[in-house]
Amino acid sequence: MKFLSDEWIKTAKEITSEKLDPEKDLKKATTSLINVIDNIPPDGKSVYFYIAVKNGIITEMLLDQTGSLLEKDAEFVVTGNYDTFVQILKGEMGTLIALIKNRVKIKGDKVKALQFVKPMDKLNSCLREIETEY
């Protein structure tokens, strides 16, 4: 299925709720973030991917192409190119490396963001199980 399609988001919700342990994988974290994915082929548009986690349980996963999700009070806004997000999701680049190499930019408390790197890597490895067409 096509990356960032409605079908992909629906599958992502199902697979993460089924496979991620709130305590072990997501460390009972409570946070929210908006991934701003820029330069999506073929027309270079942006997509906004919102994730909310409460006590280690993913409560929301939303996708938007208008930017209206930016009105949500997210703790973090992570911005990067489509290619970078694809590399992270394929496991070709870790979240921490993307941050260190400035491939993604974070708005929000950077120290707190670093605490979420391992849980986000767990989330991403779970998303890797989706047959995805990039």
Image (cartoon, grey):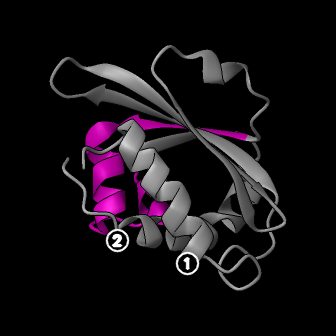
Up the image or down, 5 lies above or below 111; here it is above
Residue at point 77%, 41% (across, down): 75
Q: Residue 43, image x and y in percent?
A: 19, 17
- Tag 2: residue type? Glu
The amino acid pointed to by label 1 is Lys
Which is more toward the observer, 36 or 24? 24
Check disc 1 and report the residue beneath it: 19
Indicate the position of residue 7 as horizontal and vertical percent values. 38, 44
Q: Earlier in the sequence, mark 2 or mark 1?
A: 1
Task: Tell me, yes or no, whether the highlighted magenta stretch contains residue 8.
Answer: no
For the point 46% across and 46% down, the residue is 9
Q: Left or right: where does residue 60 sit relative to residue 132? A: right
- In the rendered image, is residue 22 in sight? yes
Q: Residue at x 34, y 71 (%)?
A: 129
Which secondary structure, mark 2? Answer: loop
Q: Residue at x 81, y 72 (%)?
A: 28
Instruction: Check if residue 84 falls in the magenta segment.
Output: yes
Q: Find residue 108 and report its horizontal and vertical position in percent.
A: 73, 40
Q: Secondary structure at mark 1?
A: helix
Left or right relative to 111: residue 99? left
Query: In the rendered structure, which segment of residues is drawn in magenta?
Result: 76-101
- How busy is the neighbourhood of tag 2: few (under 14 within 10 Å), some, or many (20 plus)? some
The dot on residue 98 is none
Quarter location, residue 29: bottom right
- Crowd around label 1: few <14 · some 14–19 · many ≥20 (10 Å): few
Q: Position of residue 102 (x, y in %)?
A: 43, 46
Proximity of marks 2 and 1: CB atoms separated by less than 8 Å? yes
Q: Is residue 102 visible?
A: no
Residue indicated by mark 2:
129
